[in-house]
Image (tube, grey):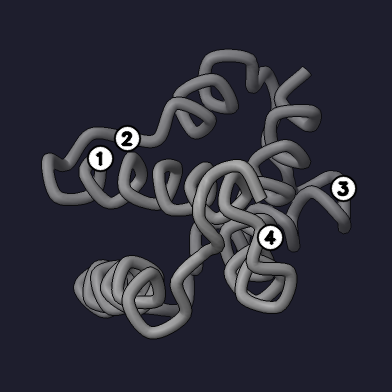
Amino acid sequence: MAYYFLILHFLFILYMVVGFIVGLIVNHRGFRLVHAGLLGFVTVLMILGIPCPLTVLEEHYSTADYKGSFLATWLNRIIYMEWFDPGAVFVADITFAMIVFTSFIWRPPPPPGR
């Protein structure tokens, strides 16, 4: 069961990173607002030191170590960025959030109803 949450977690992170670029290209108001809202939620969790709900679910349902599966091991390494200092990850998140939030100024979405 933990593998499903690991894959879901990876897809969420992929949405957060790639979704910003897609959102800028497509410039769909709802898509960008959902993306910015989720990023804001994750950023607030990081600032407050609260673990991500998907991480909590992974840990709750984990009954075995991921080392037995090549895919799960690498997804785990990518998601938790084991090779980066936690402070650098925090700075990267805040920087990315600032870029996403300011993008509403330098690339405004269309008004509602269009």
The residue to which callout 1 is attached is 45
Point out the frontmost of discs 2 and 1: 1
The residue to which callout 2 is attached is 51
Q: As shown in the figure, which amino acid type bears the numbered disc 4?
A: Leu
Give the mark, 4 or 3, whose residue is nearer the N terminus. 4
Q: Which residue is drawn at 64% across and 22% down?
A: 62
The residue to which callout 3 is attached is 69
Point out the frontmost of discs 4 and 3: 4
Task: Measure how far apart labels 4 and 3 are at the Cα level.
Answer: 21 Å
Q: Nearer the viewer, residue 47 or 78?
A: 47
Give the mark, 3 or 1, whose residue is nearer the N terminus. 1
Point out the frontmost of discs 3 and 1: 1
Task: Measure how far apart labels 4 and 2 are at the Cα level.
Answer: 18 Å
Point out the frontmost of discs 4 and 2: 4
Give the mark, 2 or 1, whose residue is nearer the N terminus. 1
Task: Measure how far apart labels 1 and 4 are at the Cα level.
Answer: 18 Å
The residue to which callout 4 is attached is 14
Local crowd at mark 4 within 10 Å, few (<14), some, or many (≥20)? few
Local crowd at mark 1 within 10 Å, few (<14), some, or many (≥20)? some
